[in-house]
Image (cartoon, grey):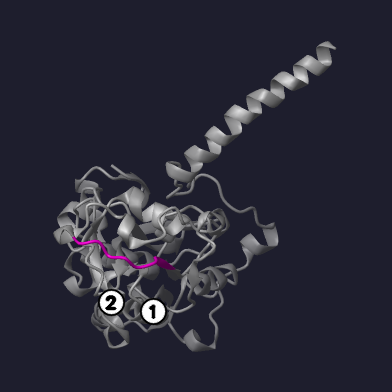
Amino acid sequence: MQAQRFFFGVFLLLQIVVPTLLLAGDHDLFVKFTNPDKGMVKSEVWQNTPIKYDTWAKSADIAVALDQHLYPTFLPMIKTYAKKHGLDIALREGTCGTSEGLLNKKQVDIAGFCCPPSFTDRLPGLTFHTIGIAALAILVNPENPVKNLTTEQVRDIFRGKITNWNQIDPAPEKKRFNMPVRPIGRLHCKTRPGHWRSILDNEDLFSPSLIEVGQISNMISVVAEYKGAIGYEVLWNLTRFKNDGSPKVVSINNISPYDSATVAKGKYPFYRVDNITTWDSPNLASIHAVELVNFISEKSQNADAVFSLVSAVELRNNGWKFKNNELIGEP
């Protein structure tokens, strides 16, 4: 009898505690960074294997793979740096997945990511350097009169709690937009924190009516075409794929993603983190690579405004948390 009462008590407690924890996770506990002290365990053979370039970088002094944001941002600077220092720098444009694969194969000295590293990205001997952040703009169709949403409204839209735009009250100009919501998602880099996961932490939390797209250009064209659509993308990609459509950017909590000074203060909730890597193990480290990363970090403040990059220097000045050169927390 006592055992039955004990298990019944535990059962009642779980009915209270578990839903509370799930609710908290659904609304508040959005993991934006991983622990820099925890990473992958690799065999001694792997750790002792040296860097060996693939054919695209065979004769290079430095092999670099950058994601689709960092590549165009720093390509002109890297070319200038290479010419000034008489270096052959092989550059490859890719994605976070490309960078992960090349690092695992030990085929590059430097790799770039548009997300904070996942646990599996943290390889032995690998160091992450944050270059900056880029605001993740929330996009709606140009005919949608909504100009501002709260963080919670965005989350409620993507989780399916808000299903019609006329539920957004008060509507601009006191005129409601009677149109079903069509959430659009590009669920890239699912194992990495931040980016779209700062809206909802995993794909299971999104509405069953979410329309998934695979390409950045699709995100822009679909939101620009469907009146009830809502999506997200960094501002640079709106410029990059401007021929695919012109969705409208809305403010979040009355803050525009174009307001880089306010984004730098940590007031804007959705963003990507741009990181690049170096190897620090004696058998993998390259002085050329370290000096190039230092150069890129220094010049990040001078990146063309079209890329909407808030540099690590600006983040430090506004109290963001770093461990060495890696961003690990908000102000």
Cα gap from disc 1 to disc 2, whole angstroms: 13 Å
| Residue ID at (58%, 69%) | 50
The correct choice, above or below, for 30 with respect to 310 in the image is: above
* Residue 81 left/right relative to 107: left
Magenta: predominant secondary structure element?
loop
Is 186 in front, or is 31?
A: 186
Is 202 in front, or is 330?
A: 202
Q: Amino acid at mark 1?
A: Val
Q: Residues within 10 Å of mark 1 (few under 14, many from 20)?
A: many
Task: Name the mark on residue 222.
Answer: 1
Which residue is tagged 2?
Answer: 238
Percent position of residue 210, x then y: 49, 66
- Which is nearer the N-term, disc 1 or disc 2? 1
For discs 1 and 2, the disc positioned in front in the rendered view: 1
| Residue ID at (51%, 74%) | 98
Of the 4 image quadrants, the one containing the N terminus is top right
